[in-house]
């Protein structure tokens, strides 16, 4: 009897594209999983919970749940060498990885905290990478990248983190951002590019880049994995 395929197998060979957004590369792999419906089914069976910090209106504006280990293992097997090649990560550096999580954006715009209404960065270490798999379609927005106008920064490194934070907090205090999910850019942030959501699309970018989830509040705030803005989020550091 032929062996059964691995659960959540990655389609081979992967269709890898590197696109420029401002001064930085973003890697996109479309049709990433051979059977994305299996991972969507796993999300429907998962138990979603708010993140720590939700009461303080900080961090991810929605719910998360653990992803099956089989997906996580296959992801790392492919992505560790791919990230090192495409993002100039030294080969000798060991990989550190967060657990993969299903994520559903559910918070209404009026419930967002001030820092949830502006672009953010995930970490300022040099090789911290964000990996996002869309299990929703283009009606649910995408991921956008920005440059902070006052500082001229697209990437927040450890050397720039304190300066950027001081300027940003002053801007938010002086002019609180409106109650909406950020998207087009404004007088403080220049929009550099948008990668649209697409079902079964994987996106890889440096976590130090200023970015935000572009969210369609009329469609994307459902807690139902089949109807909402469902993604799988993973972070790697080297």
Image: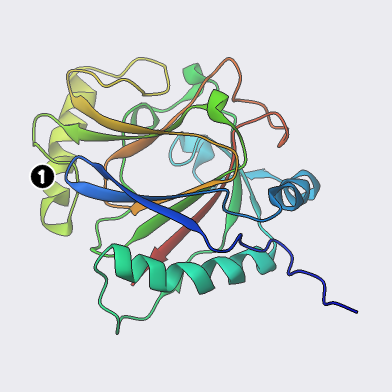
Who's the residue at 31% across and 69% down the image?
85
Instruction: Please state if 167 lies on the left or on the right of 49 as rendered.
Output: left
* Crowd rating for badge 1 (residues with CA inside 10 Å; few <14, some 14–19, many 20+): few
- Assign the N terminus to one quadrant of the image: bottom right
Q: Secondary structure at mark 1?
A: helix
Q: Nearer the viewer, residue 31 or 164?
A: 31
**Residue 111: x percent and y percent?**
50, 22
Q: Is residue 127 above or below residue 36?
A: below
Who's the residue at 9% across and 30% down the image?
150
Q: Quadrant of residue 82?
A: bottom left
Determine which residue is flagged by label 1.
163
Instruction: Please state if 136 lies on the left or on the right of 19 as rendered.
Output: right
Q: Is residue 174 above or below residue 225?
A: above
Q: Nearer the viewer, residue 134 or 31?
A: 31
**Residue 23: x percent and y percent?**
16, 45
Instruction: Please state if 223 lies on the left or on the right of 206 as rendered.
Output: right
Q: Nearer the viewer, residue 139 or 58?
A: 139
**Residue extending farthest right:** 1
Q: Is residue 188 above or below residue 147?
A: above
**Residue extending farthest bottom:** 92
Q: Quadrant of residue 139?
A: top right
Q: How is the image coloured?
A: rainbow
Who's the residue at 37% across and 26% down the image?
117
**Residue 102: x percent and y percent?**
62, 48
Q: How many marks?
A: 1
- Assign the C terminus to one quadrant of the image: bottom left
Who's the residue at 25% across and 62% down the image?
125
Q: Nearer the viewer, residue 5 or 52?
A: 5
**Residue 213: x percent and y percent?**
43, 34
């Amino acid at each position: 009897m032929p062996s059964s395929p691995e659960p959540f197998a990655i389609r081979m060979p992967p269709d890898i594209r590197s696109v420029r957004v401002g001064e930085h590369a973003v890697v996109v792999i479309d049709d990433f999983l051979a059977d994305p419906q299996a991972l969507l089914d796993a999300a429907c069976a998962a138990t979603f919970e708010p993140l720590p910090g939700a009461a303080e209106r900080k961090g991810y504006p929605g719910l998360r749940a653990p992803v099956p280990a089989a997906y996580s293992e296959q992801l790392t097997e492919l992505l560790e060498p791919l990230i090192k090649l495409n993002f100039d990560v030294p080969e000798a550096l060991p990989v550190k990885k967060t657990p993969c999580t299903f994520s559903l954006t559910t918070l209404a715009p009026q419930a967002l905290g001030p820092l949830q209404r502006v672009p953010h960065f995930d970490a300022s270490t040099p090789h911290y990478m964000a990996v996002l798999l869309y299990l929703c379609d283009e009606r649910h927005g995408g991921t956008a990248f920005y440059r902070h106008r006052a500082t001229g920064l697209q990437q927040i490194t450890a050397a720039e983190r304190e300066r950027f934070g001081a300027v940003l907090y002053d801007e938010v205090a002086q002019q609180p951002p409106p109650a909406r999910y950020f998207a087009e850019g404004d007088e403080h942030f220049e929009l550099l590019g948008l990668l649209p959501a697409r079902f079964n699309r994987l996106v890889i970018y440096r976590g130090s880049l200023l970015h935000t989830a572009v969210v369609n509040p009329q469609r994307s705030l459902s807690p139902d994995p089949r109807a909402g803005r469902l993604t799988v989020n993973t972070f790697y550091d080297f």
